Amino acid sequence: MALLEAAVAARDTTIAERDEQLRRERAEAALRIQRLQLQIDRFNRKAFGRSSEKLGQMLLELEDLEADVAAGMPDAELPIVANTDKVRVLPVRKLNPNLPRKRVVREPSCACCPGCGGDLRAMGEDSDEMLDLVAQAWQVIETVRPKYSCRTCDKIIQAPAPAKAIARGKLSHAALAHIMMAKWGYHLPYYRKC
């Protein structure tokens, strides 16, 4: 009986030692993950964003955590890193409303449903703005593409979007050519182009 109790006690101590070792390894892994996440965030900020004072504060907290783990405090609470997987919504940039505007409406090629020949009804429109240079005067060209739906088969019909010089860009071909010519042809700095 005494041998069994000694074996159980030895097993309990080894299990407790393993648990402690696993707890320490988990804390070190979590700390390593946070350190790598901070490095990634720092590189992203350096490459894509403004510098922030928060990063310095986070690095100081990280050094404190490393000191706590090195001192043998495995139960130190790790700060929660914000979730960076959020979908970023791109802002819609509006052009100056004081500029003269020209509205271009692009209708579909036929006035009836190409699938069944039924009547079409208006159900909305997509609008897009581009900055254009006409005779050395800036104006906004707004391209409108109305959407129509068929009354019989519920098919949606819309004219194709016009080609752009730059995808999702706000400059027309003429405005882009003017800027490129002023920059590389006439060697003007950017602030003197308009």
Image (tube, rainbow, N blue to C red):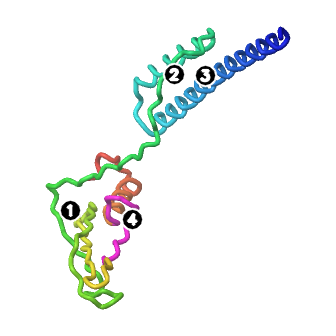
How far is disc 2 from disc 4 in space, using C-alphas?
Answer: 49 Å
Q: Which residue is mark 1?
A: 139
Q: Mark 2 near mark 4, Cβ–Cβ under 8 Å?
A: no
Pinpoint residue 139: horizontal percent, then vertical percent.
20, 62
What amino acid is labelled 1 in the image?
Gln
Q: Which residues are magenta?
A: 157-173
Q: Identify which residue, 168 or 178, lies in the foreground.
A: 168
Instruction: For marks 2 and 1, give the one nearer the viewer.
Output: 2
Q: Is residue 150 magenta?
A: no
Q: Secondary structure at mark 2?
A: loop
Q: Mark 2 near mark 3, Cβ–Cβ under 8 Å?
A: yes
Question: In the figure, 46 relative to 55: above or below?
Answer: below
How far is disc 2 from disc 3 in space, using C-alphas?
Answer: 8 Å
What amino acid is labelled 4 in the image?
Ala
Pinpoint residue 26: horizontal percent, then vertical percent.
63, 25
Q: Identify which residue, 139 or 38, lies in the foreground.
A: 38
How far is disc 3 from disc 1 in space, using C-alphas?
Answer: 60 Å
In the rendered image, the residue lying farthest to the front is 1
Give the dominant element type of the magenta stretch: helix, strand or loop: loop
Name which of mark 1 and mark 4 comes first in the sequence: 1
Pinpoint residue 164: horizontal percent, then vertical percent.
37, 67
Q: Which residue is at 14% across, 55% downward?
A: 98
Question: In the figure, 40 relative to 55: above or below?
Answer: below
Q: Which residue is mark 3?
A: 27
Q: Which mark is residue 78?
A: 2
Q: Which residue is mark 4?
A: 165
What amino acid is labelled 3 in the image?
Ala
Mark 2 burial class by Cα count in 10 Å: few <14, some 14-19, many 20+: few
Question: In the figure, 148 relative to 85: above or below?
Answer: below
